Image (cartoon, rainbow, N blue to C red):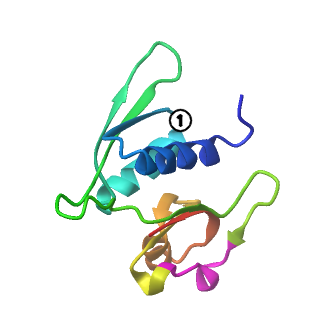
Amino acid sequence: MTTDPIADYLTRLRNAILARKKVVEVPASGLKKDITRILYDKGYILSYKLEDDGKQGIIKIALKYNPQTRQNAIQELRRVSSPGLRQYAHVEELPRVMNGLGVAIISTSKGVVTDKEARSLGVGGEVICTVS
């Protein structure tokens, strides 16, 4: 049992990228589905599929690599807020990852969104992770 399922999710992605895997499977949850959807929408992963295993479900994520350089689209995944130390940011204090080239994933009252969407909605929230 892990005490931080989001850190486990990000670690599974990082390990699969380092091992040059094409597909990684992670246990599903609502927050993980939202993070995966954002990664897909922003072009960091190739595709994903939700499967029902009779329990909580599984998310199968197809990782995206550059065919020429064999480099992954995700260069860095970093957990910001953790169960022991939650990191909240007001709309003016939302992090800017690589001067806007990366994405910060924020859990707001309007749902799980990117930092740019949170700024346009005018809401702050818990900074879950950054992706570049």
Residue kind at label 1, given as amino acid type: Ser
Q: Quadrant of the C terminus?
A: bottom left
Q: Position of residue 110 (x, y in %)?
A: 52, 60
Q: Is residue 81 left or right of residue 66?
A: right
Give neighbour class at mark 1: few <14, some 14-19, many 20+ (Cα, 10 Å): some
Q: Position of residue 19 (x, y in %)?
A: 42, 45
Q: Is residue 100 above or below residue 32?
A: below
Q: Within the image, what quadrant is residue 92 found in?
A: bottom right
Q: Is residue 124 left or right of residue 12?
A: right
Count of numbered labels shown in the rendering: 1
| Start-end of magenta stretch | 89-97
75 vs 8, nearest the viewer: 75
58 vs 76, nearest the viewer: 76
Q: Position of residue 41 (x, y in %)?
A: 30, 58
Q: Is residue 52 above or below residue 84?
A: above
31 vs 6, nearest the viewer: 6
Q: Which residue sits furthest right?
A: 84
Q: Quadrant of the N terminus?
A: top right
Q: Which residue sits furthest left?
A: 68
The reply to whether the magenta stretch includes residue 13 is no
18 vs 56, nearest the viewer: 18
Q: Judging from the image, what secondary structure is the residue with disc 1 in?
A: loop
In the picture of the structure, the residue carrying the numbered disc 1 is 29
Q: Is residue 55 above or below residue 24?
A: above
Residue located 58% across and 79% down the image? 95
Q: Position of residue 82 (x, y in %)?
A: 73, 55
Residue located 47% across and 51% down the image? 35
Q: Is residue 105 above or below residue 24?
A: below
